[in-house]
Image (cartoon, helix red, strand yellow):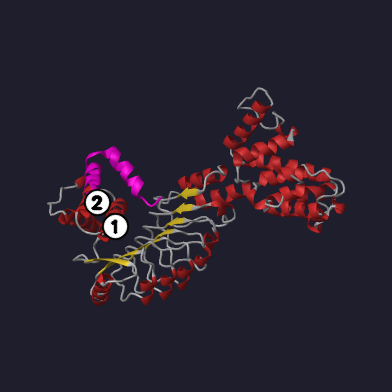
Amino acid sequence: MSLESSLNAVTTLTAYQHLLQLYQCNNPALDDLAGVGSALHETLTALPESFRKKIFEHIANQAEKPVESKYGEVHVFQPLTKLQEAIKKVAAHVLDSFKSVETIEIVRRICEHTERPFSEGSSWEENNVTHDMPLLLKTMHDVLGDLTPELQEILDGWAKQAKDKEKRVEAKSIITSFFKDRKKDSLGLSGLNLKSFPSGLNKLLSRIRMLSLNDNCLTELPKEITQLHNLVLLGLSNNCLTELPQGIAELRNLSWLFLTNNQLTSLSKEIGSLQALTTLNLYGNRLTSLPEEIGLLQNLKELELQANFELEELPDGLGKLPQTCKISVHRTECLKAVCNNLEQAQKAPGYQGPRFSFFEPPMDQHNTELKSLESSVEELSSRLKETPKPLPALYQLGLLQRNTIRDWINRELSVANYEGRGEYRDFWIRNLLTCLEHAENNSVFREDFLKSISLI
């Protein structure tokens, strides 16, 4: 592969791979190779700002020029030996910046590769790891992945600002691990009481396909989250969100969006642009209306609207959703007439619209947390005309875990309602009750059960 072609996809490389490419570009006639020169500039631009700044500073200092003169930027490739020396300085900066665990691992791997003795107490200088720069940069790529001192500084600063019961240190460790392992495409930060998400990471988080921020205390999302263009699943259940960020329409690959138990009062018209969306869970919000554009979601298979007791009307756009879409909604006083009409309409011969499941609202619509779990279990038993079995261990779980079980029951029950009555539905419900009984009686199964039904 030519140098030019190897630099075309700069965004797929780590900072250390970019440094390696620059370090190995020893062609003295770059001026005669405009294409290659342009590719090198792209590689340079792809480096973190702190890396570029150190390279420019070193080149200017070597020429005894003031840094502010931008001499380093203009002469960065002239000669390339100066650039190589500058890259050595950047590598040394990285080794000095990271905690001992990362630097020790880099040194250990280099010693192992070169068949030299390794002593954990010795410094990287004593092991002369900068002697073979290509090996050092490759090892940095293997150990650090996308993690740079710049990113580590952002995460450290964010973690130090933790408030109340926020588990930011734990979150920082999870994010750091994600950056190091480029094979990972999912990031789970659920149940950490987070009130904010670190900003400035959007470029390197762009490879995320699944992001879980369930069971936190988020009141808003950073706008950068709309730049995660590869995202297919976004879990935001059990937070305190009042709105979604502008630009949510940019998440064009998003297939699953979970917003259970938030404080949303409305949805932006942008929701209609999420054409890949198959599941939209809005259970337990404060929605008063829905945009007509929701009918544009022609790949939608599940729309959960239960426990939105302030919902005053259903848009005509819902009728444009495909026949394969299942919609669950409470038959509140405001919606009773609409729900009754829809129920009759979908029984008519030739009906081609989405499939609705209607549920009667609880007696107390403002106190449904623990009671709604019990009510959901009671409803399952009543469908089989059985007396509900006591499940005290489940009812004494924390609020978030009870809500998780309740939401799982409601999702599964909506499937049972859709699939029809009779033996099949009873078989489905019997399996649900069996799972709950196992979770009640077996603590190990209960832990696995809760993990499996959580929204990733």
Looking at the rendering, in which quadrant would you find the N terminus?
A: top right
Residue at x 52% of width, y 43% of height: 177
Classify mark 2: helix, strand or loop. helix
* Circle 1 residue: 415
* Magenta region, main secondary structure: helix
Q: Which range of residues does the magenta coloring cover? A: 431-456
Residue at x 50% of width, y 56% of height: 231
Circle 2 packing at 10 Å, graded few (<14), some (14-19), many (20+), is: some
- Asked if marks 1 and 2 touch (Cβ < 8 Å), the reply is yes
Under mark 2, the amino acid is Trp
- Estimate the x, y position of residue 181 in percent, counting from the top left: 55, 42
Q: Is residue 185 visible?
A: yes
Q: Nearer the viewer, residue 43 or 89?
A: 43
- Estimate the x, y position of residue 239 in percent, counting from the top left: 38, 59
**What is the count of numbered marks?**
2
- Estimate the x, y position of residue 421 in percent, counting from the top left: 21, 58
Classify mark 1: helix, strand or loop. helix
Q: Is residue 418 magenta?
A: no
Quadrant in the rendering for residue 353 = bottom left
Under mark 1, the amino acid is Val
Q: Nearer the viewer, residue 68 or 234?
A: 234
Q: Is residue 59 above or below residue 239?
A: above
Q: Earlier in the sequence, mark 1 or mark 2?
A: 1
Q: Is residue 162 visible?
A: no
Q: CA distance from mark 1 to mark 2?
A: 9 Å
Is residue 416 found left or right of 187 in the rendered image? left
Residue at x 70% of width, y 49% of height: 51
Circle 1 packing at 10 Å, graded few (<14), some (14-19), many (20+), is: some
* Circle 2 residue: 428
